[in-house]
Amino acid sequence: EESHRLKHTFREVLVRLFRYLGPDDLCRCSQVCSTWAELVKTGSLWRHLYPVRWARGDYYCGPPSELDQDPDEEWVQNLQEEGRAYQEWDEDADIDESEEAHEDALAMNAVQQEKRLLNGLIQNLLPAVGSSVRTVSLAYSVTVSSKMVRQILSLCPNLKHLDLTQTDITDSAFESWEELGACSSLEHLDLSGCENITDHTLKRLSLAIGDMTIPTCSKNIPDRRAKLLKASPSPVKLLDEHSTCSMGRTRQAFIFKRRPGGRGMGCSPVWVLDPAELADIEDAADWSRRGGVSAQDEEKGSILELQAGGGYITDTASSYWQQLYGALGEVQCGHSTCCSSDTAVRTVKGAQCGSQPTGDSAEFRTTCPSEGDYRTDQTGASRALRFLSLSGCYQVTDLGLRCLSQGGGLPLLEHLNLSGCLFITEIGLQELVSVCPTLNYEHFYYCDNINGPHADMASGCQNLQCGFRACCRSGD
Ligand code: FES
């Protein structure tokens, strides 16, 4: 009994000491012995994960609130350079000893380190500590794939802060959020610059943060979920120029323009791919980047490495995901005014439909639940989202915003950035804002060309001078 208590105290003291260590030192400690390796996998030691920084020698692991939210320009530029080198990297090319080639080699090292680290986290650490993780920041990652994000989200159901700024992820990254309340503690979601994101993600987000309008004890949650899914935008199978309405095409013309420094926008039309095929496509792309090594083969050899020759955490248990893809619906342009047949908009006037807004907010009301329909929380679901940035997610439409306004709205939302969302209209904005009672208008951004809600107080578009995120005035 006594020895058991001593053992317990020893382990407790050790974990307390571990709290003073960063992720690099923790990984080294995990090599000491099996007891230490086990203790290192204590959830409270891994609350905030910044793998992109860690891969570059910055081992910050505190809460995101203490981080400078706007990383310095040079750091971002370096990451962009690394991304470029990664895209152009040819493993089989002859050895080039020029200075430029040397810089590219350094960039590739950082990128490969980042990729190994992400694989190690997913396979070895998160299966043990995922439920304790509160922050995952993958901002500016050049290697993270939708599949990786999907795995991370499956393993971290209690996330509060998720930053995916300027990554190439697609809607399929959020497949694990198809369950009602799958990530109900989420407070901060940054998808700035994620150009592949569409309404599918907003639909899943709305489900994942829970539904305040149904009691927990309700037996008909699956029915409710089915209803929500039905009311939310039908998945877009293939959106081409001809299927968009005239007002959508005016805006669409902007995004066909090639922008200097843009990442692919303007190089190809807005083809939204069939999600049922995305798994294969992203896997194929990932496969080709790995030089033909299958994911499984690569996973077998992966460990969480923070420094060359440094510590690691190993675990034989690996997690594999089933990839489920739902049935697809109709082709839609995405405007509430054009697409809502079963949830018809009562008033369809708007600047982009050729009519001037009257300024009367009642004109923008829709058949979605009125403000009075949103009851206080009866379920324990708080819909805790306070920060949402979709800046540059130019494919998002009013239907995506409508999804967010369902299930109780966003009662705690303070910051909303919709700059560069080229397909949204004042109607969608009005619908969403009407269920965001705590929105701080100074932190409310949307296109300057939309005469939307609180236009006099809102902060306008943030992407005007940005140069690398979508903006209808990027050519001005
Ligand atoms: Fe219209 Fe930036 S999106 S001003």
Image (cartoon, grey):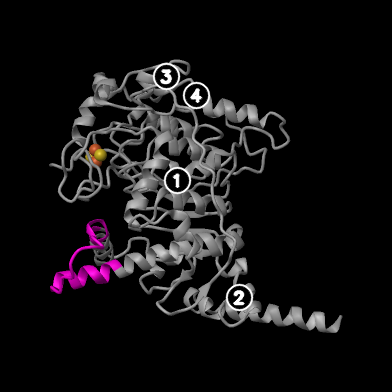
- Asked whether 319 falls inside the magenta stretch, the response is no
Q: Main secondary structure of the magenta part?
A: helix
Q: Which mark is residue 37?
A: 2
Q: Tag 1: residue type?
A: Ala
| Dot 4 crowding, Cα within 10 Å, few <14, some 14–19, many 20+ | some
| Dot 1 crowding, Cα within 10 Å, few <14, some 14–19, many 20+ | many
Is residue 438 in sight in this rendering? no
Q: Residue at x 44, y 42 (%)?
A: 172
Estimate the spatial distance between the alpha carbons at disc 3 and disc 1, rounded to whole Å.
Answer: 27 Å
Q: Which residue is mark 4?
A: 368
User: Which mark is first along the chain, 4 or 3?
Assistant: 3
User: Which mark is first along the chain, 4 or 2?
Assistant: 2
Query: Mark 1 touching mark 4, by CB under 8 A?
Result: no
Q: Which residue is mark 3?
A: 340
Residue 238 percent coordinates (x, y): 34, 27
- Report the span colored magenta: 84-108
User: Which mark is first along the chain, 1 or 2?
Assistant: 2
Secondary-structure class at tag 3: loop
